[in-house]
Image (spheres, rainbow, N blue to C red):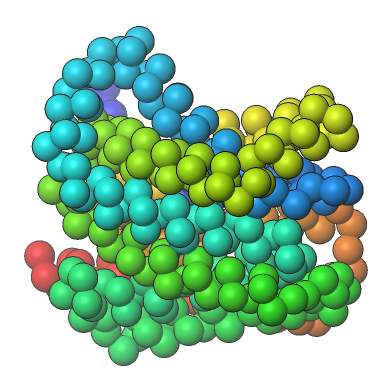
Amino acid sequence: QYKMDVLPPASVLGIPWRLLQLAGCVVCMHGLAAVFAEMAFSMPGFRFGWFYTLVQCLTYFTLVLLKRLVLGGLIQSLKALRGSLLGALLVGTSMTVSHGCGVASFVHINYTTAMLFKSAKVPSVMLGGMVINQQRPRRSEVCWAMTLTVGLLLFGLGDRMESPRFSAIGILLVAGNLCGSSITSNLQQRVLQRDASATGVEQLLFAQYAVASVILLVFTAATGELAEAMTWYMTDGRGRAIAASTADNIFSFLGLEAVFRITGEFDATRANVVCSCRKVFTFLFSFWLFPKPFGLCHGLGLALATIGSVQLARSKAKATDSIK
């Protein structure tokens, strides 16, 4: 008798198996995190988007620091941070603006609508890749990226009809998120494609969240949001808000490494395709846990987003195989 190892398929429907594994992790972890984030922002009186971002960045930085202390490699991470200080400042600053604007927008417009508008970052990331990493997307990739975006916009339009919380400030913050994300994702790709190992990913996490934490601490203290948020947490928020934000941060962190691995092993566009596709599952979780009507726009948007994300991933895989 001969024992034969069963190997996983190289690809499924033209999408690399490795990409599907990492995408599954992102969808599950970030989908759960989004549920807890929506729970926090739906609490009466919670209007602290930038403070929430500060807590997230401090949590991520602390978790990476603890991991390095337990498993070793802290000195190497500090040396790497010192050796690439300019790159860390650029990525950290860009990420602070993009992520901070995205989270702050939840205060001004409906949570699922904000998530939906942020999904338009796939075409902007592709445009950023053309400028920063000299990537030239094919026509099919642009077509499927637009299909994905239109599907997500339709899904959000259906939700917008049911929960009309809308303001120009929220839209401007989402626009800041889109512009910042196109730069951040491609800067991360440039760094990670030099070292996409687990150590390289953790060093980037360590560097960018160290920089972001400092910037956000200074910003929230200067605007007064830090003191206001701390007062709210101590009086009105207490256990429920702390539990929701902690769960959000932990689940988000567990999915972050998978996002960075996709960026390093594949590219920034596919990482954002996965994150945009994940938003469909976020909406489904939201509709399930926070009941809302499901109409024609939701169904059509879900179908277009699913088709666009699958076909874009397949198109990118074919382009990579043709280069090889």
Residue 33: percent from left, percent from top: 63, 42
Look at 27% across and 54% down and name the residue there: 90
Residue 260 visible: yes
Look at 27% across and 84% down and name the residue there: 138
Instruction: Tell me which corner region of the image, top left, top right, bottom left or bottom right, holds residue 323.
Output: bottom left
Q: Is residue 261 toward the left or the right of residue 309 in the image?
A: left
From the image, which quarter does the C terminus lie in? bottom left
Extreme-top residue of the structure: 70
From the image, which quarter does the N terminus lie in? top left
Q: How many marks?
A: 0
Look at 73% across and 30% down and name the residue there: 242
Instruction: Tell me which corner region of the image, top left, top right, bottom left or bottom right, holds residue 221.
Output: top right
Q: Nearer the viewer, residue 245 or 126?
A: 245
Residue 318: percent from left, percent from top: 25, 71
Residue 200: percent from left, percent from top: 22, 36
Look at 15% across and 27% down and name the residue there: 79
Residue 202: percent from left, percent from top: 30, 33
Residue 310 visible: no
Q: Is residue 55 toward the left or the right of residue 32 in the image?
A: left
Q: Nearer the viewer, residue 287 or 140?
A: 287
Q: Eyeballing the image, is 104 above or below 172? A: above
Q: Nearer the viewer, residue 315 or 75?
A: 75
